[in-house]
Image: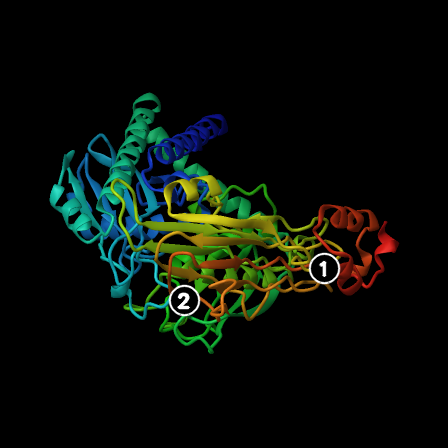
Amino acid sequence: MSMDAITVQILRNKIASLVDEMHYHFYRSGYSSIIRESRDFSCVILDRTGRLIVAPPMFFHAPVYRHLVGRILELYGEGIAEGDVFVSNHPYEGGLPHVSDMAFVAPVFAGGEIVAFAGTIAHKADVGGTIPGSTSANATEIYQEGLLLPPLRIWDGGRELPDIERLILANSRQPDLVRGDMRAQIAITQMGASRVGQLCQRFGAATLCEAFAAILGGAAEELRRALAGLPAGTASAEGYFDSDGFDLDQPVKLAVTITVADGAASFDFSASGPQTKGPINLRPSMVEACVFYSLLGSLGPKLQFNDGMRDVLRFVYAPRTVTNAQAPASVSNYQMTNLKLVDVILEALAHFNPARATANAGSSSALGIAWARSRPGQSNIQYEIMGSAYGGGMGHDGASGTATHLSNLHIAPVEILETENPCRITRFDLVPDSGGAGRWRGGLSYQREYELLEDATVTRRFDRTRFPPNGVAGGSKGSRSRFVIRVGTAGEQETQGSGRFEMRAGERFLLQSAGGGGFGDPRRRDPAALAHDLAEGYVSVEGISMDYRLESSETI
C-alpha cells in the first residue's frame, strides 16, 4: 500500500523548511565573507543511501552528496555510529568540486539503524597549496591546490576528534577563519541531523523512510513524463573553453550527444577533449550538476529536482577526458568549465524543445587577492565571486550583472570589500552595448575597477576572452570578458586569460565580465524596448546603428 499523498507532501515541506533553516543559520554564523556575503555553501538532507531529497539553493553541489555518502558507506559501513560526523574535500575520493570545498556529513539513527544523513559543503578561505587562497588559475596537479582529505571521521560517537581539526588548521594560512567556518558548519550539520531525528520521533522512522522513497520515485516519474513529451532523437553540440590556464594558446573542447527515447535520456560526453594540465578538469559529479540544471531549464520550472531523477538518465564518459578527469589532474577552476558546459548542453537540448532555447550566458568567475601584509584579527585573503550576464531567450531579455547558471551566488557589496580589505573600488557599472543584439537582448556585462592600497598577489580565474557568448536564432554574440592590470600606467596590459599577477600598492586593475548572447533577429526588436534601452543607457546611439541596423531616430 502506497503512502498517502498528504503525508508525503507534509514531510517534503518539513525537509524543505529544514534546509532553509540550516542555510539561514549557516550564513549568519559564517566567519569569512565567502560564507557571509557570497554564500558559497549548501545544506541538505539525504536518505539512508545519500540520495538528495530537496535541492539546495547552491544547485551544483546537489549531485556531490550521493558520491560522498556512497564512499563513506563503502569505507565505514556498519562502523558508522550515532553522533559521528565525517569530513572530506577530496574531488576524487569524495566527488567534491575542488579542494577548497569542504563537506561534513552526519548520520541520523532510529531504532539502531541509519535512516538519513544531514550534510553541508562550504568553500574555505585557505586549505594550503602553492598560493594563498588555494584556488589556483594555473595549477598542474591537485597536490598544488591544497591539503587533501579523503572521507574521515572528525566526530566519533558524539565526541570531537581534535587531531583532525589541528591537521587541517596546520595546513591553512588562515587558521582562525577556517576554524570559525568549520565549527559553524559542523554545528549546522549536527543541527540538521537532530531535526530529522525529531521528525522520526514525531512521524515514525518507517514513515519518514517511506516518504523519502515516494518523493524520490515521484521525481523520477515526473521526469519520465516530461521526457516522453519530447520528440525522440539525437542531438549533439560542442563548444570551446578559452584555455586550461597553463597552455594559454590551446582551446579546450567540450562536447555532448543527447539521445531521448521512451521517457529516458542519455548524455554522452565521450567526444570532449582530453583532460588538461591546467585546473579546469571536471569530476562526474559536476557534469551531472550541469545536466540536471540544463534539463530542468529546458523542460520547465515545475519539476522538483532530487536524486530520484538519476533513475531516468544515463551518463556516458570516456576516461581521462576533461569531463571525466583522473587523479592527479587539477580541478581548481572547475566552475568556469561548468558554465561553458551548460551552454553546450543547452544548445543540444534546444533541438528537442526550441521554445525553451536560450542564448549563451557570460561565465561567472572568481577573483582572489592575497595581501602582502597581515592585519590582526582579519584575513589577508580577499576572495570574490564575480557575476556576468544571461543570454536572451524566447520572450525575454537576459539578466544583467548577476551570477550565472548553477550557483545562485551573491556578488559581494562594495562597502564590505572596502571595509574589510585594503582596496578601493573606483568603478562599478554596467557596460553599454555589451549585451548581444537580438529580438531579445542579451544581458549586459559589468565592470569593476580596483585600486590596491597595499602590495598584493592577484589571482583571476575567468573565461570568454577568446570565445564570447553566442547568440541563437539570428541573435548576436555578447561582449567578451576582459582583465586589465596596471590601468592608466605605461605598464597597462590586457591579460590573455586566467592567471596570477604581482601588483604594487597604488596600482589598479579592471575586470569586465562577458555579456550575454542575443536571441532572434535584432531587426525584429520591439521599438519601445529599444527606446527604453537607449534611455537607460543599455545601448548607445552608435550601438543601435551598428547592432540593430537602425538609425536612433527610428526608435524614439
Q: Nearer the viewer, residue 16 or 145?
A: 145
Q: Is residue 192 left or right of residue 169?
A: right
Residue type at mark 1? Ala
* Residue that badge 1 annotates: 437
Q: Residue at x 33, y 66 (%)?
A: 330
In the image, residue 39 above or below residue 547: above
Q: Give percent across and percent down for residue 353.
A: 66, 56
Q: Is residue 20 left or right of residue 346?
A: left
Does the image show residue 521? Answer: no
Q: Is residue 226 left or right of residue 136?
A: right
Q: Are marks 2 and 1 in contact (CB under 8 Å)?
A: no
Q: Give percent across and percent down for residue 237.
A: 57, 68
The tag on residue 499 is 2
Q: Give percent across and percent down for residue 401.
A: 57, 49
The tag on residue 208 is none
In the image, residue 505 above or below residue 22: below
In the image, residue 502 above or below residue 67: below
Circle 2 or circle 1, nearest the eye: 2
Q: Nearer the viewer, residue 548 or 223?
A: 548
Q: Nearer the viewer, residue 23 or 449?
A: 449
Q: Tag 2: Cα neighbours inside 10 Å, few (<14), some, or many (≥20)?
A: some
The quarter in which the N terminus is drawn is top left
Residue type at mark 2? Gly
**Nearest to N terminus: mark 2 or mark 1:** 1
Does the image show residue 248? Answer: yes
- Determine the secondary structure under disc 2: strand
